[in-house]
Image (spheres, rainbow, N blue to C red):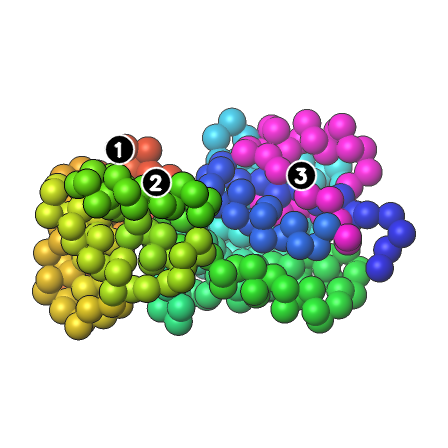
Amino acid sequence: MPTHLKEIIIVDDDEEFLTIIADALSIYKNYFNIHTAVNGKEALNILHTLRVFNLVVTDLNMPLMDGFELLAYMKRNCPQIPVVLITASGTPKIEKIVKDIGVFRYMEKPIDHPLTRLLKERCYSPMLTNVFINELALHIFKGLGINPKKTDFTQVNLEISSDQIIRGRKMAPVSNITFYRFKKSAVKGNADAQFQIGVEYFAGKVIKKNDSEAMKWFKTAAEQGHAEAKLYLGHMYLRGDGVKKDVREGVKWIKRAAEQGNKDAQFYLGHMYLSADGVDKDESEAVKWFKKAAEQGHTGSQEIIKNLQ
């Protein structure tokens, strides 16, 4: 283990993605310090402040100063510093450009951006969350010239797998006391509380995971018109979690949530049409729903639309 910590900077304008990446990599705090920036301009301010830095991880599409401009600056002023590029806009043309610039490593973001997955073993291309994080960590360590302990990677896998994430929405932590307050309100008929109780049974962090209980509360809230509960209810029917698998019923509830204006459901539905997941593949229909979500500020949808057009 090095006596002096290395300094790395992670740059991405999607703050949720940035937070998840930084949190996941924080397990390696004995090896390097993590600094984050939401665009190339902010990254340069950090670089100038640090003066001594060892590696940069950056996205491409960002406001004010994008990844291409940052890479060009790095090539001109500090070509010896390795850069790991992660982007959702991977194309052969971009691969050639970044190769010509001299990027140390090139990685594609998981398609369910940002770093999203659906419960254990139900994951989407190109890679699982823990595989993505471990691969990124390996590139960082190689760039820094450090050999980490194998046990550190095991710990990362445990921390990632303990979270339940549904396309683009990470579960917020809830205390045991808060859970029972929610449950009391849920029993009285509060739809928001019913949804939150469903989330807790779905995630299994405060209370023991119970998909059947989660299903019950999501359905109760959904029948009261709770849009996000409709999304989760549809997801569970689609996957057969806590209920007999019923793709038609799953699609029905997810569509209802999307039509109600829930941006996460619109994003989810867009992916369904893009990957023929429960519906026939229809790129124009996928774009329609991604655009609806993007208009509400859904950053993952905005990124995908750039890639599709």
The amino acid sitting under disc 3 is: His
Q: Distance between the residues labelled 2 and 1?
A: 35 Å
- As measured in the structure, the alpha-carbon distance from the residue carrying label 3 to the one carrying label 1 is 30 Å
In screen coordinates, is 284 left or right of 69? left
Q: Is residue 134 left or right of residue 211?
A: right
**Viewer-nearest residue: 175 or 269:** 175
Identity of the residue drawn at 33% across and 58% down: 202
Q: Compare marks 2 and 1 and give the one earlier in the sequence.
A: 2
* Residue 143 drawn at (x, y percent): 73, 57
Mark 3 or 2, nearer chain start:
3
Query: In the rendered image of this protein, does residue 23 appear above or below residue 211?
Result: above
* Residue segment shown in magenta: 30-58
Q: Mark 2 points at which residue?
A: 181
Q: Mark 3 points at which residue?
A: 35
Of marks 3 and 1, which one's residue comes earlier in the chain?
Answer: 3
Q: Say whether residue 49 is magenta.
A: yes
Residue at 17 percent across and 41 percent down: it is 189
Q: Do the residues labelled 2 and 1 touch (CB within 8 Å)?
A: no
Q: What residue type is labelled 2?
A: Arg
Tag nearer the camera, 3 or 2: 2
Helix, strand or loop for disc 2? helix
Q: Position of residue 147 (x, y in %)?
A: 78, 65
Q: Relative to 221, say whether 211 is above or below.
A: below
Q: Disc 1 designates what residue?
A: 295
Estimate the spatial distance between the alpha carbons at disc 3 and disc 2, rounded to whole Å.
37 Å
Q: Is mark 1 on a helix, strand or loop?
A: helix
Depth order, front residue of 13/278: 278
Q: Tell me the quarter of the picture where residue 203 sits.
A: bottom left
Asked if residue 43 lies in the magenta stretch, the reply is yes
